[in-house]
């Protein structure tokens, strides 16, 4: 699972000034605007926030319906988060340079059409392709949605809108697991995708009438770093394919090394393209900010661990313990509550404790949870064998994500805050995909109960090892970091990718900067 780090949006960085002062020096009362635009935008974002959580709970039912293999299980999650993360920075640039309403409509339209295609899928490959298209739609939708909010509202209305946006992200995991469980139990797994269709159609129809057109900057298309985005996504897809091939074909198989070789070539090409591009996705100077790069790396690692853990636990609860989808959704609620509660406590003490201390403490607690889950693998009692480990994982993860937001942005100048927070969020999404792929490869056969029981403990032992490595990385590279007064980060406990394994696709306030260059 994951909680997105929350970086408060600073509205002037978007170039939208607040109300002009009156002659007496106090801000003029800004005109109030109808909430219709925000209602449409938040409805679209809710679909994205809930998507991975909803789908994760439905995975066992999808597996039985489409006869998914172990590889198909992980690709159903990885395809979505790889495309949403790999294209997020490009989506933000498109929202900056092209008519934001057109970008928003394109994102909603693609996400809705892909949801329908997912619901109608008859073969595993059809589902994986449509899930990838959903991820691409989300990468367009979210930055454009926040851009619409930032330009449609000002002053107190804008603050209220952003607070609601963050709250929706925070509630994503709890709402997602409950909705996914209820829909799957009552109507079948296809309903978790079909529910997006009428919402998407209503949002498109409403936005066409109420959202103002934006301007497209001259030469906008020439300024988009499309080659960079494509080589990044292609390299990540090849990397995940290579990781999966280590499980299904072995380390020595030609297809394993072909995939890993292709990943190396494409990701190297991405690095070279970024150095030469006139307007790269990530300016070269950004990579020289040590706190940002190290915190983003820890973010990717922790997200991968948590998302992979929830992915495996969803299968374990339903296929080994025999929980129904709706019961499995309820069984994930303590994890969501632990993340939210521990994040709230961390946001209050980070000013005294510092970011690095909280990250280290959270990683140690999370490691304890992973080891507990590993040692209880094969047990058939939720209360005795699963719940204690999940509670420890949640209690550790909450402080980590709060502190990462502070550590990542601590040394970033204001003018670079947009691309910096976008980079953190990209690390979050990519980490989720690599985590699911890696833990699925370690676990082995996820398509049978015996294979799942055998692989569950092995996967969580590997999870603990990764967390120990992250402890070392944090101790060596992440600065101590205390937030400036009033700037304490607050991770919203569980932004949408929750029990799906993506702990949070509620791209909360941090996305306010994802397109802020």
Image: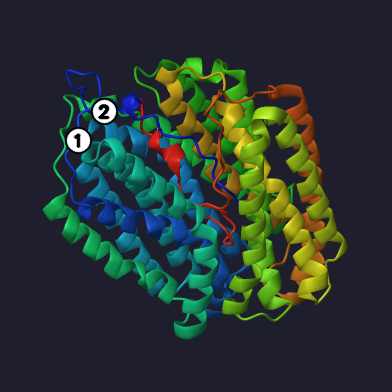
Cβ atoms at labels 1 and 2 below 8 Å apart? yes
Residue located 14% across and 44% down the image: 212
Which one is earlier in the sequence, the residue at label 1 or at label 2? 2
The image quadrant of residue 511 is top left
Mark 1, residue position: 30
Q: What residue is shown with label 2? A: 18
Query: From the viewer's perspective, is residue 359 above or below residue 310?
Result: above
Q: Residue 471 lies in what quarter of the image? A: top right
Separation of residues labelled 1 and 2 (CA atoms): 9 Å
| Percent position of residue 173, x then y | 54, 60
Q: Residues within 10 Å of mark 1 (few under 14, many from 20)?
A: some
Viewer-side residue, 255 vs 393:
393
Is residue 3 visible in the rendered image? The answer is yes
From the image, state whether disc 1 or disc 2 is nearer to you: 1
Q: Along the horizontal axis of the image, is 235 left or right of 418?
A: right
Residue 32, quarter of the rendered image: top left
């Amino acid at each position: 699972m994951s909680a997105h780090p929350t970086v408060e949006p600073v509205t002037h960085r978007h170039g939208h000034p607040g109300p002009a002062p009156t002659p007496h020096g106090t801000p003029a009362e800004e005109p109030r605007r109808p909430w219709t635009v925000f209602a449409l935008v938040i409805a679209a974002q809710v679909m994205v926030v809930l998507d991975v959580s909803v789908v994760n709970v439905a995975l066992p039912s999808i597996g039985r319906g489409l006869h998914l293999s172990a590889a198909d299980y992980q690709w159903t999650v990885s395809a979505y988060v790889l495309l949403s993360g790999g294209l997020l920075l490009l989506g933000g640039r498109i929202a900056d340079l092209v008519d934001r309403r057109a970008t928003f409509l394109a994102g909603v339209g693609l996400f809705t059409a892909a949801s329908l295609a997912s619901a109608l899928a008859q073969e595993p490959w059809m589902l994986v392709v449509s899930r990838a298209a959903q991820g691409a739609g989300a990468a367009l939708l979210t930055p454009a949605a926040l851009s619409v909010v930032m330009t449609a509202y000002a002053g107190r209305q804008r603050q209220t809108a952003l607070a609601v946006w963050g709250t929706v992200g925070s509630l994503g995991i709890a709402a997602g697991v409950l909705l996914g469980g209820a829909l799957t139990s009552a109507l079948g797994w296809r309903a978790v995708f079909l529910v997006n269709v009428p919402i998407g159609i209503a949002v498109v129809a409403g936005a066409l009438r109420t959202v103002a057109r934006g301007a497209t900057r001259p030469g906008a298309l020439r300024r988009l770093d499309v080659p960079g985005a494509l080589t990044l996504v292609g390299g990540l897809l090849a990397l995940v394919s290579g990781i999966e091939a280590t499980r299904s074909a072995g380390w020595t198989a030609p297809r394993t090394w072909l995939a890993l070789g292709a990943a190396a070539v494409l990701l190297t090409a991405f690095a070279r393209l970024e150095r030469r591009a006139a307007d790269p996705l990530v300016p070269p100077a950004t990579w020289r900010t040590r706190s940002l790069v190290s915190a983003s790396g820890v973010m990717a690692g922790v997200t991968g661990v948590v998302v992979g853990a929830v992915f495996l636990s969803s299968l374990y609860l339903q296929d080994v313990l025999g929980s129904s989808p709706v019961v499995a959704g309820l069984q994930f609620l303590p994890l969501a509550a632990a993340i939210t509660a521990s994040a709230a406590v961390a946001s209050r003490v980070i000013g005294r404790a510092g970011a690095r201390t909280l990250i280290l403490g959270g990683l140690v607690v999370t490691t304890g949870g992973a080891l507990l889950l590993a040692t209880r693998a094969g047990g058939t009692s939720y209360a005795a064998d699963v719940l204690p480990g999940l509670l420890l994982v949640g209690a550790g993860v909450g402080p980590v994500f709060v502190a990462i937001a502070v550590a990542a942005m601590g040394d970033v100048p204001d003018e670079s805050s947009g691309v910096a927070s976008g980079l953190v969020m990209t690390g979050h999404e990519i980490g989720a995909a690599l985590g699911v792929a890696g833990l699925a490869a370690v676990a082995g056969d996820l398509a049978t109960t015996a294979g799942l029981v055998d692989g569950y403990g092995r996967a969580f032992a590997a999870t603990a090892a990764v967390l120990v490595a992250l402890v070392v990385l944090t101790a060596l590279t992440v600065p101590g970091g205390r937030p400036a007064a009033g700037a304490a980060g607050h991770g919203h406990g569980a932004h949408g990718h929750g029990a799906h394994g993506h702990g949070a696709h509620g791209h909360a306030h941090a996305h306010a900067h994802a397109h802020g260059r």
